[in-house]
Amino acid sequence: MKSAFILLSLSLFLTLSSLGQDRSSFYQVYGFRLPVLHSGQYALTLTPRYSYQPTDQNYAYISNSYASISTYEDTYSFFTVSSTALFGISDKTTLALRLEYGPKQSYYSGNSKDGSGQNTVTYNSRTDANGDRDVFSSSFTLAHRLSSNIEISAITTYNVDNFPSSRFSYSPINSLTPNEKSFSTYKNRYLDIIFNITILSN
């Protein structure tokens, strides 16, 4: 969390410091990947984000002599902060750097209950699950304008996503000791490189 606070503070400081620039010459050419910045100009944005998603699901099966029911309650929540920086390397070349970071935090919690019976359905088992998550994503874009209507660009994206989780099952439902335990680790790395040329009609 300390590293996230440092990133947040630094991005906020740089964003506020960019307000003193003369932005009258900033403009975006429709169809070009990056806006036009003159040499030495820069622009920064800071974006904190929090998402929260609770879900509830119920399933039931009923026949003449048997019935079963399952109930699921899941909650996903996550906080990230991202910063995007644009730099004018020259009057014809713009550089963009985007960083997003979500420190390790509780990401997922859920529980489910299962029951069955003939005349009366009662819950007889439950499962509790939880998972942490931390993410880092970055993108680097370099765009050069060969002329007023031609832009070439290169975009590199790199992401890392970690999601360790655990699951505990209890039967009977009021048991304090789990009958089954399972643990899993998900780690995804993603690298993408794109080259692009845009030609606009005069």
Image: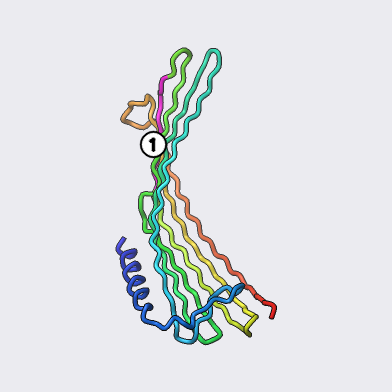
Q: Which residues are magenta?
A: 122-131
In percent of the image, x 36 and y 75: which residue is there?
Answer: 14
Please give the residue where the numbered disc 1 appears in the rendered image: 128
Residue 63, given in percent of the width and then of the height, sits at 55, 17
Side of 114 where 198 appears, left or right: right
Q: Is residue 127 magenta?
A: yes
Residue 38, given in percent of the width and then of the height, sits at 49, 85
Residue 5, given in percent of the width and then of the height, sits at 31, 65
Of all residues, the one furthest to the front in this rendering is 24
Which quadrant is the N terminus positioned in? bottom left
Q: Main secondary structure of the magenta part?
A: strand
In percent of the image, x 61 and y 72: which residue is there?
Answer: 31
In percent of the image, x 37 and y 24: which residue is there?
Answer: 172
Q: Is residue 59 magenta?
A: no
Q: Nearer the viewer, residue 99 or 164?
A: 99
Q: Nearer the viewer, residue 170 or 87?
A: 87
Q: Nearer the viewer, residue 123 or 92?
A: 92
Residue type for callout 1: Asp
